[in-house]
Image (tube, rainbow, N blue to C red):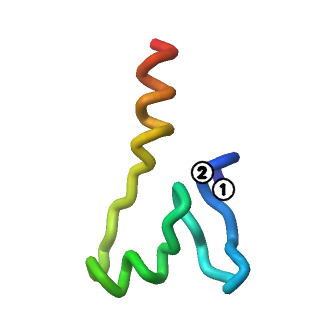
């Protein structure tokens, strides 16, 4: 998993950028493409 972006939360769910992936799927369905805005901005700043 990408350091600092993804982790397993206390419920055992994948968390991406602080958002519970299980909850995102419930709201938006699958397939679901998730991007972390903060990580994208950090990457662009380094360019």
Task: State the separation of the CA atoms marked 2 and 1.
Answer: 8 Å
Q: Residue at x 47, y 39 (%)?
A: 38
Residue 7, placed above or below residue 45: below
User: Badge 2: how crowded within 10 Å, few (<14), some, or many (20+)?
Assistant: some
Q: Residue at x 37, y 80 (%)?
A: 25
Q: Identify the residue under disc 2.
A: 5
Q: Secondary structure at mark 1?
A: loop
Q: How many dots with numbers?
A: 2
| Residue most extreme to the right | 10
Q: Residue at x 48, y 74 (%)?
A: 21
Instruction: Quarter of the image for the C terminus: give it.
Output: top left
On the rendered structure, is 27 left or right of 10? Answer: left
User: Badge 1: how crowded within 10 Å, few (<14), some, or many (20+)?
Assistant: few
Q: Secondary structure at mark 2?
A: loop
On residue 16, the disc is: none
Q: Nearer the viewer, mark 2 or mark 1?
A: 2
Q: Identify the residue under disc 1.
A: 1
Question: Where is residue 16 shown, x and y percent of the image?
Answer: 53, 61
| Residue most extreme to the top | 47
Question: Where is residue 4 shown, x and y percent of the image?
Answer: 67, 47
C-beta proximity under 8 Å, tags 2 and 1: yes
Q: Residue at x 38, y 76 (%)?
A: 24
Residue 27, placed above or below residue 35: below
Q: Quadrant of residue 18?
A: bottom right
Instruction: Quarter of the image for the N terminus: give it.
Output: bottom right
């Amino acid at each position: 998993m990408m350091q600092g972006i993804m982790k397993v939360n206390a419920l055992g769910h994948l968390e991406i950028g602080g958002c519970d992936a299980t909850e995102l799927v419930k709201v938006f369905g699958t397939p679901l493409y998730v991007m972390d805005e903060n990580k994208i901005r950090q990457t662009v700043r380094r360019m």
